[in-house]
Amino acid sequence: MYKLVIQGGKPLKGTIKASGSKNSSLPILFASILADNPITLNNTPQLSDISTTLRLLMSMGADFILESNSSLFVDSSKLNNLVADYNLVKTMRASILVLGPMLTKYGEAKVSLPGGCAIGTRPVNLHLKALEELGASIRVENGYIYAKTDGLIGANIHFDQVTVTATENVIMAATLAKGTSIINNAAQEPEISDLCCFLNKMGAKISGIDTSIITVEGVPQLNGVEYSVCSDRIEVATYLVAAAITGGSITVKNANPQAMRSVLGKLIEIGADIKTENQSISLNMKGKRPKAVSIKTGTYPNFPTDMQAQFTALNTIADGHSSITENIFENRFMHIPELMRMGADLTLEGNTVVCKGVKSLTGAHLMATDLRASASLVLAGLAAKGTTTIERVYHLDRGYETIEEKLKSLGADIERVQD
Ligand code: UD1
């Protein structure tokens, strides 16, 4: 097992390049099942969630070649085992994205239920309801979803709650359905738009991209294409917070400022000087202590839940009081007790964290619990006085490509060491 050891207190300075988006790459890799021939995907990040997806696709009969660090040639066009096994699904909830493509292309799918996770129960009822509305018959037995259809039929679907992966699952299923589907109250995350652009390049007929009403006209078949995934807005935002929490000044290239307006607004509110260009974002704290900001997470374009933990870390050393309300997941506060062990003054009241900024944190021995909570501990460690050791860094490797290399290139004192 690896751990990260950080000597805090060094302002980050320099330029890094953002990786491709994890949350775009995953649905797009699952969408490769829909194609009648192979796809080439560029700008993919090297992450354990990507390896898990490739292993899952391979277990069903797909093949892939790593053409370069960020380029994947994937042939999922002829699957021979329509089962997504528990052992792979349990390690990554996004595996549920295999369901829509497999069902619509092959007329059947057996997919393990993902189960709960550290941040909440995370049911998949809305995925199943929407697929049933497209005509699938679905039963859940022995921890598996069994789905069947003689051919999905376009339908008018309304999501009672905005959900990212269920929107993606139903869009993918609708691409090969007979007739037109209208998806109301669809999630509008940029990663969904990226998936839709990829599917349209394959020959799908999707309109209403970037809106909450998406229309999918079914087509008989889709073709393999070459595509570059968008940059990872959560990774970009995490590095910007790393610069802010250390009083530093960095530029992140390969970023899309348009997709990050809510986060950039909050960074300006804390006192950061932000400059954006077409594909890059610069943040300069000019050595100042950040000002506390209050945050409420929401669906896009509101403040992303995937940045809640990182901004909580930032608020712990900010000047003033703040409240951070988590509206998406019921238990996304695993970082709170760990941050308190570093001297943070935090109180959890229902789904709100009340934070009184302290002048500084002190290094401590910490346990990473989930992906974004772990990122917040790294940020706190970068700002803290002394040594911070973070165990279970495999959580970070799910979503941050070579995190310690990127931070080191910005001047951080961080090492990955084996137990
Ligand atoms: C996706 C992202 C994740 C992000 C989250 C919210 C991917 C691979 N993951 O996760 O990084 O944190 O969006 O932006 O893109 N819900 C139900 N029933 C369902 C589906 C969802 O009750 O069938 C609930 C969830 O428990 C949660 C809320 O809806 O409370 C939103 O979840 P959802 O948008 O579905 O998150 P994911 O797609 O799993």
Image: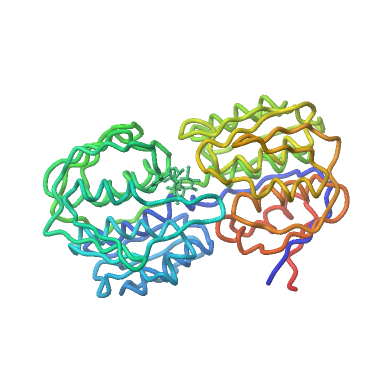
In the rendered image, residue 202, in percent from the top left (x then y), is placed at 25, 52
Looking at the picture, how far across and down is residue 148, in whole percent?
Answer: 19, 61
Which residue appears at 71% of the width and 50% of the height?
Answer: 377
Q: Nearer the viewer, residue 119 or 32?
A: 119
Front residue (pair 378, 195): 378
Q: Is residue 203 visible?
A: no
Residue 227 vertical position relative to residue 78 in the rendered view, above or below = above
Left or right relative to 299: residue 6: right
Q: Farthest residue toward the right?
A: 386
Identify whether 376 is placed above or below 271.
below
**Place of residue 132 in the rendered image (x, y in percent of width and height, measured from the top left):** 21, 50
Residue depicted at x 68% and y 72%: 1
Residue 246 coordinates in the image, percent (x, y): 78, 41
How was the colour assigned to the protein in this rendering?
rainbow
Q: Quadrant of the C terminus?
A: bottom right
Residue 315 in sight from this viewpoint:
yes
Q: In this orientation, which residue lies closer to the viewer: 110 or 418?
A: 110
Total count of labels: 0
The quarter of the picture where residue 60 lies is bottom left
The image shows residue 249, relative to residue 27, as above or below, that is above
Residue 189 falls left or right of residue 176: right
Residue sitting at x 13%, y 54%: 220
Q: Quadrant of residue 317?
A: top right
